[in-house]
Amino acid sequence: MKKLLLFLVCLIYLNGFSQCFTSISAGYSHSVGLKPNGTLWSWGMGLNGQLGNGTDTDKHSPIQSGTATNWAKFCGGYSNTFAIKSDGTLWGSGYNTYGALGIGSVIGHTSNFTQIGTATNWKEIAAGETYGIGLREDYTMWAWGFNQYYDLGDGTTTQRNSPVQIGTTADWKTICATRLQCNFAIKNNGTLWGWGINSGAVLGDSSVSAWSVPTLRNTATDWDKLALGHGSHALAIKTDKTLWGWGYGDFGQTGHDPTTSYANSEFNQIPGLWNAIAVGGDKFSMGIKMDGTLWAWGKNIVGQLGDGTTNNTYIPMQVGTDTNWVSVSCGYQHTLALKSDGSLWAWGDNSFGQLGNGGTTALTIPTTIPIAGCTLSAEEFTLTEEVLKVFPNPAQEELSFSYAGTALINTVVIYDLSGREVYNSHPVVSNNLKASFGIGMLQSGSYILSLKYNEHTVVSKQFLKE
């Protein structure tokens, strides 16, 4: 490969740039991310105000949700977003029919975050399609919204427009909710409980159509982490890091062979030791093993498994070869994930811009979005074709690019579609640069050009080598 020729226009450091996303959540067709400075950012479908930015329009790149700088936790739901501030207050934005936000009214929706009640001790939040569930610091569980199918677990079918306590116990550790009115929770003693609709036998006994209150799912006392999507299957990790799946598995999303059984009330162990899990709404699953590798299984109609194909699988398949994945979150047909270097990756459906790369084209492999990992300036959130140009595209023997952003760049890297690094420039320091280099040694195919600063991707663009 020819030596990289860099023409540095100026050497300007960008002082005080903000840091990478520290946590992410994929809603049904939108995405949310939190930065270390306490600001909340969102992108994707905005029809019902779920982006919390005061509008009802889609955003194809991350945009800050309001001006608050003390957000601590959050959850992207079907058409809404819930978030907890560092002062323990709970807020919601988006779809509110049936009292789904818990703000005390049934106004159709709100596009700005609105406080839910007056409590200041919220610690965890989960979102169903038309309801919400929360835990407080005293380990009590609360719920609100639609309740026709025992969604809230309070033993009634009464709609609740504000949070009501579920039961009287104060021993809940973590919660999960789905679009299909099915919910699970783990108590501090490691037991697993469920309630709501028993679609796909996800709650257990297939002769029971619904459970009206939290009911013990099995006798194990070592459950640790939960993942439910917008469908009717579930995953859970035990304290020994073993992974288990159950529920409806017609595309293999539970890890069962779908040719033998679709609905599985019994738990199926998925081989390996696991650190993180996520469940997608359109029947797929993602997981990160203890060695930092990323795996996927289930339905793959739009490439949501990230393996570069649209082939379904009930056997977990490794996504790429990287070993530094730390968190993953799934929407209906899209996935977000973070690496330990702070970079943010996205793939799957992108009809509403939920991948955050400025476009609406689906991606079948994990791809750094334009502001992936680090958003070094507000300008980087609204990248246009003028910020990074790659030409010619397709390219044959030589590739050129020009970058005119305000963020500092010190490395130019090319990845193949498996995520393998095939080129890395000598360090450069600039925030305006042009480059041309030979790519004759690359095989024909698609590649990703990434401009980086200290291992954090600032902007990326895909190109084709003929």
Image (tube, helix red, strand yellow):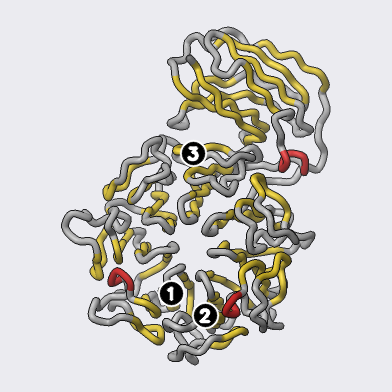
Q: Which residue is mark 1?
A: 181
Query: Of helix, strand and loop, which one carries label 3?
Result: strand
Task: Find the residue positioned furthest to the left.
Answer: 260
Q: Residues within 10 Å of mark 3 (few under 14, many from 20)?
A: some
Do the residues under discs 2 and 1 have CB atoms within 8 angstroms? yes
Residue 146 circle label: 2
Q: Residues within 10 Å of mark 1 (few under 14, many from 20)?
A: many
What amino acid does circle 2 point to?
Answer: Phe
Work out whether residue 269 or residue 153 is closer to the camera in this orientation and state it.
153
Residue 397: where, in percent of width, then height?
54, 8
How far is disc 2 from disc 1 in space, using C-alphas? 9 Å
Q: Is residue 463 above or below residue 75?
A: above
- Does the image show residue 183? no
Residue 357, quarter of the rendered image: top right
At x 46%, y 37%, the residue is 365
Work out whether residue 262 or residue 366 is closer to the camera in this orientation and state it.
262
- Does the image show residue 213? yes
Mark 1 and mark 3 lie on one chain; the one further toward the N terminus is 1
How far is disc 3 from disc 2 in space, using C-alphas? 34 Å
At x 18%, y 54%, the residue is 259
Residue 363 circle label: 3
